[in-house]
Image (cartoon, helix red, strand yellow):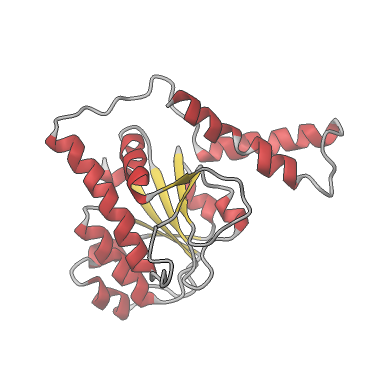
């Protein structure tokens, strides 16, 4: 189950952070690391800071785009430290862990972490079903990348351990949620149809598509849950 959970880092700029993230992952039993367009490639510093988790670095998937890292996933959760104008469903880390473990019993899950300085863009966050925020000290809420991964990874492990210790069987969905790449194709076809019928304007399709249509799968999830 845990191997179905991807830790996705977007445009990481320091190799030491890659190593520290690998260490944070492996201590919690996670090994599936994806690097999206890293500004630097893993090097000896990454291996050194991995501190015994060099296999996570060595087996990392390096891809050019976030879409590639999300392909095949049915649940995507993006981390966000800042208040956004996006009207998106929010999770706390514990809820994130529970949802991730439940979904990973059936299909891959992606937990997405942004750039060290600026996090994820609004466009990247719109690719996520949920956003997760860590309730740190408001007077000093600065978490580095590895710290954020450690918090989320811990909650994933606690949720997974609960299923093991209680002998719980995670139910498999008879009608599973659509994969991210299938939804992207659907959105593309739908946008072209809405443009052709004049429902949205070619120069301003974003508000309807992003605020209304793209949120529908998340609302459907909440209704089913």
The residue drawn where x is 39% and y is 49% is 92
Residue 26 lies, with reference to residue 104, above or below; the image says: below
Rendering quarter of residue 190: top right
Considering every residue shown, the one lying at the far top of the view is 174
Picture quarter with the C terminus? top left
171 or 48, which lies in front?
Answer: 171
Considering every residue shown, the one lying at the far front of the view is 139
65 or 104, which lies in front?
Answer: 104
**Is there any visible trace of residue 31 in the rendered image?**
no
The residue drawn where x is 49% and y is 36% is 179
**Is there any visible trace of residue 40 in the rendered image?**
yes
Whole-percent x, y for residue 167 in the image: 14, 30
Picture quarter with the N terminus? top left
Whole-percent x, y for residue 43 in the image: 34, 77
| 221 sits to left or right of 93 | right
The residue drawn where x is 74% and y is 37% is 191
| 185 sits to left or right of 146 | right
The residue drawn where x is 39% and y is 57% is 134
Whole-percent x, y for residue 59 in the image: 31, 59
């Amino acid at each position: 189950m845990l191997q179905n959970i991807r830790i996705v880092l977007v445009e990481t700029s320091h190799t030491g952070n890659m190593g520290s993230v690998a260490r944070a992952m492996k201590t919690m039993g996670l090994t599936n690391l994806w690097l999206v367009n890293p500004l630097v490639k893993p090097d000896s510093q990454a291996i050194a800071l991995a501190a015994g988790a060099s296999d996570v670095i060595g087996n990392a998937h390096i891809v050019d785009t976030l879409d590639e890292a999300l392909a095949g996933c049915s649940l995507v959760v993006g981390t966000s430290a800042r208040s956004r104008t996006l009207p998106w469903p929010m999770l706390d880390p514990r809820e994130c862990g529970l949802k991730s473990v439940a979904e990973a019993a059936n299909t891959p899950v992606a937990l997405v972490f942004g750039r060290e300085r600026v996090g994820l863009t609004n466009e990247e966050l719109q690719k996520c079903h949920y956003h997760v925020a860590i309730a740190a000290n408001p007077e000093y809420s600065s978490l580095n990348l590895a710290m954020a991964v450690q918090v989320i990874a811990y909650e994933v492990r606690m949720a997974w351990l609960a299923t093991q210790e209680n002998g719980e069987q995670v139910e498999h969905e008879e009608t599973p949620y659509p994969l991210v790449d299938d939804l992207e194709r659907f959105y593309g076809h739908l946008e072209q149809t809405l443009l052709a019928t004049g429902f949205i304007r070619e120069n301003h399709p974003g508000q309807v598509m992003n605020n209304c249509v793209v949120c529908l799968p998340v609302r459907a999830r909440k209704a089913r849950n």
